[in-house]
Image: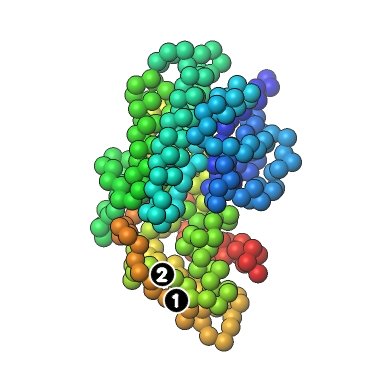
Amino acid sequence: MINKMETILITGGAGFIGSNFIPHFLEKNKEYKVVNLDALTYAGDLSNLSEIKKNSRYTFVEGDICDRDLIKKLFKQYNFNGVIHFAAESHVDNSIKNPDAFVRTNVFGTFNLLDVAKKYWMESPNNYKKGFETSRFHHISTDEVYGTLGETGLFTEETSYAPNSPYSASKASSDFMVRSYYHTYGMNVVTTNCSNNYGPNQHDEKLIPTIIRKALSGEQIPIYGDGKNIRDWLYVLDHCKGIELVYKIGKTGETYNIGGKNERDNLYIVDIICGVLDKIIPKETSYKEQISFVTDRLGHDFRYAIDASKIENKLEWKAEENFETGIKKTIEWYLKKYR
């Protein structure tokens, strides 16, 4: 029996995580077509997807998730069976300076997608149209919605939300909007909240690309505060595999936390990157001498760490990279980009 080709809408697919996800998903799922909708703001870059631009199962559309007429037109044109929603304003520093763009994209944009999908797929609450019985909306979120941790403890799916930046507050709002469409309308939704991703295609302004870029250019490497803020680091391809699993077999209405069990503080991150660079591109002095401490970010959360046991136990997902293996692959990728 030949599988019917399904078409899914992926939003924000030219960004960091989306541009790693789409090639992976197309490679592993030959029965799917993908339409990538991206506004190509500062975080989106089509060169991230050059390897698939000639793939007959891939289509790119430039556009804004807040444009309801465009979303409706795309649903009608491509008859989407699913949505995987990456698109978001995501840079915390930018959210402090310009919070209104975050509310517009992350809250209103998510609502727009949800509402168009519901109307296209569903006759009435809890009643899907024929042919759309398995259509699913997968919302990609962040561990930052949970706020900050002290020196111990982990975020679980039951942790109360306590966002501390305009960015995380806008993501928390979008998570609640998705939840409401499940509880009110019986819509088939799933949400994943991930820890800090790293790997190829990440925007230059983020921590790890910044460390590598500044080190290579001989500039000072800026580290916030005392460098002791802790994050749980997740290699982006491990995250993509988790998203694929949740989209395909996750339980409707559920949230899954995806984390790497790789808690590291920023001092450790800069230290290990400089140490690797000292070995592979040595210079007269260590790259560590370029480290410079700068004024801390406003409202900078101390520690994030995810308990990923739910996705590990229920869906048999497991991170394949630890930080030390993943960072070597990441540095090698950025050396090709920056040199």
Determine whether label 1 and label 2 are within 8 Å by CB. Answer: yes
- At a point 52% along the width and 19% down the height, the residue shown is 120
Q: Position of residue 201 (x, y in %)?
A: 58, 54
Left/right placement of residue 24 relative to residue 52 reads left
| The label number, if any, that marks residue 291 in the structure image | 1
- At a point 63% along the width and 66% down the height, the residue shown is 338
Which residue, given by chain and number where applicable, does mark 2 sit on? Answer: 223
| Quadrant of the snapshot with the N terminus | top right
Left/right placement of residue 283 relative to residue 127 reads right
Q: How is the image coloured?
A: rainbow
| Residue 43 visible in the shown view | yes
- Lower sequence index among marks 1 and 2: 2
Q: Is residue 188 above or below residue 242?
A: above
SS at mark 1 in the image? strand
| The label number, if any, that marks residue 230 in the structure image | none
Q: At label 2, which amino acid type do we have?
A: Ile
What is the residue that sits farthest to the bottom in this orientation?
Answer: 284
- At a point 67% along the width and 35% down the height, the residue shown is 59
Q: Is residue 184 above or below residue 225?
A: above
- Count of marks placed on residues: 2
Q: Position of residue 321 (x, y in %)?
A: 50, 56
Q: Is residue 10 above or below residue 89?
A: above
Q: Position of residue 89 (x, y in %)?
A: 46, 46
- At a point 47% along the width and 50% down the height, the residue shown is 319
